[in-house]
Image: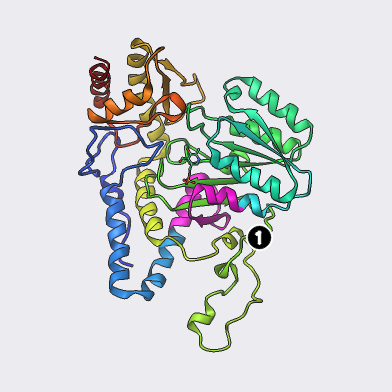
Amino acid sequence: MSWEPDPTGARLGDRSLFVGLEPFAYVNHAAISPMSGEVRRALFAVMNTYSRDGLSAFLTWQPQRERLRARLARLIGADPSELALMPSTTRTVVDTALSLPWKAGDRIICLRGEFPTNVTPWQRAADTFGLEVVMLDADAFRTDAGLDALRAELARGARLVAVSAVQFQTGLAMPLGAICEAAHAAGAEVFVDAIQAVGVVPIDVRALGVDYLGCGSHKWLMGTEGAAFLYVRTGRELVPRTAGWLSHEEGTRFLFEGEGHLRYDRPLKRDVSVLESGAINGLGFAALEASVACIEAIGVEAIFEHVQRYHDALEPGLLERGFVSERHATQRSGILSVRPPAGIEVGAIARGLRERGVACTTPDGRLRFSPHWPNALAEVPRVLAALDDVRG
Ligand SMILES: Cc1ncc(COP(=O)(O)O)c(C=O)c1O
């Protein structure tokens, strides 16, 4: 592998790494990030190696994935041995939900309003293992009422709290430290869906006390779909119910070392990499290292501040036009969501904006803007002008 990430072209407010990106304001990173030239360079490097070498490219790219694991661990304050490379955020939840050492009757606290990724797998685990899912209201965490309701529910007994770091519709950053503290005090653990946070909101799993965290690449990490990672805090026990051929120690020896190594009794790996059960998305994980290197070079704190300046510029213009902001005074993220004035349909506005070069989305009736490090503050007046044009 001669490829190395090169983040030297990554600068706040400068989209010159995104040659060919059509919308003049791509404020849709909470949906899918466009690919930078650096991501494309990584993808071509993998493709070129496989085109030339076939099987041996598999071995060539293995060290790159270990380098990525170390970078991802650094990004969230974890140890590389606590991370598994996975195919999607959803699979991180599914595999965790299937692998916890449940006891019949265990209770799981989920939040109404969350993306279904962090609810469906817990419901399926409840059906499979005889558990109970209790729903609280995510939006209640705008005030202390959310934590009060959580503590009351925890007092009834719970094994796990499943929460997103940032709510996908409203952009509300959840009080993860307080949630983990309350959960641990009651003997419960916390699973965090962090795909709407990592890359734009600083996250330190150790300082927050997070037990499990899943995150995909294609939003704020600016990689591709089909690559994700799972953090499992050291000491948390998994029952390897989703293990596969690559979950064994020395599981590939039979391919390379001649006769007599094909065995089914090799011990399973003891850390979270036991969940890396089959062939891995080499393209996606090379792309992810390219995009994470850019994020690291700029710094997540600087990106967060930059995005807040963008929202600070955009929000007043939206309020003047009758939209109602859902941005919290302190629990902020990369997402600025607004509700439309009465009688206005957000789908039509988003389509009109798209035709005028502004890419945003409409989760559950909100107009959602999600800029990242390449967005320039100078875009904002043009975004508002496009909005005026759409509304006539
Ligand atoms: C909070 C949240 N979790 C999970 C997902 C889906 O992630 P994946 O497709 O990686 O499973 C999304 C959006 O697509 C999301 O907003």
The answer to whether residue 377 of the structure is visible from this angle is no
The answer to whether residue 164 of the structure is visible from this angle is yes
Decide: is 141 above or below 186: above
Which quadrant holds the N terminus?
Answer: bottom left
Residue at screen point 39% across, 26% down? 308
Boundaries of the magenta span: 68-95
Image color mode: rainbow
Q: Is residue 69 left or right of residue 140?
A: left
Q: Tell me the element at label 1.
A: loop
Q: Which residue is mark 1?
A: 241
Numbered marks: total: 1
Give coordinates of residue 193: x percent, y percent. 54, 41
Q: Amino acid at mark 1?
A: Arg
Give coordinates of residue 224: x percent, y percent. 37, 50
Q: Is residue 119 magenta?
A: no
Q: Is residue 85 left or right of residue 162?
A: left
Q: Is residue 20 left or right of residue 195?
A: left
Residue closer to the observer: 355 or 62: 355
Residue at screen point 37% across, 48% down? 223
Q: Is residue 265 left or right of residue 166?
A: right
Give coordinates of residue 227: x percent, y percent. 44, 53
Q: Residues within 10 Å of mark 1 (few under 14, many from 20)?
A: some
State which quadrant residue 303 falls in.
top left
Q: Is residue 80 magenta?
A: yes
Residue at screen point 42% across, 36% down? 200
Secondary structure mostly seen in magenta is: helix
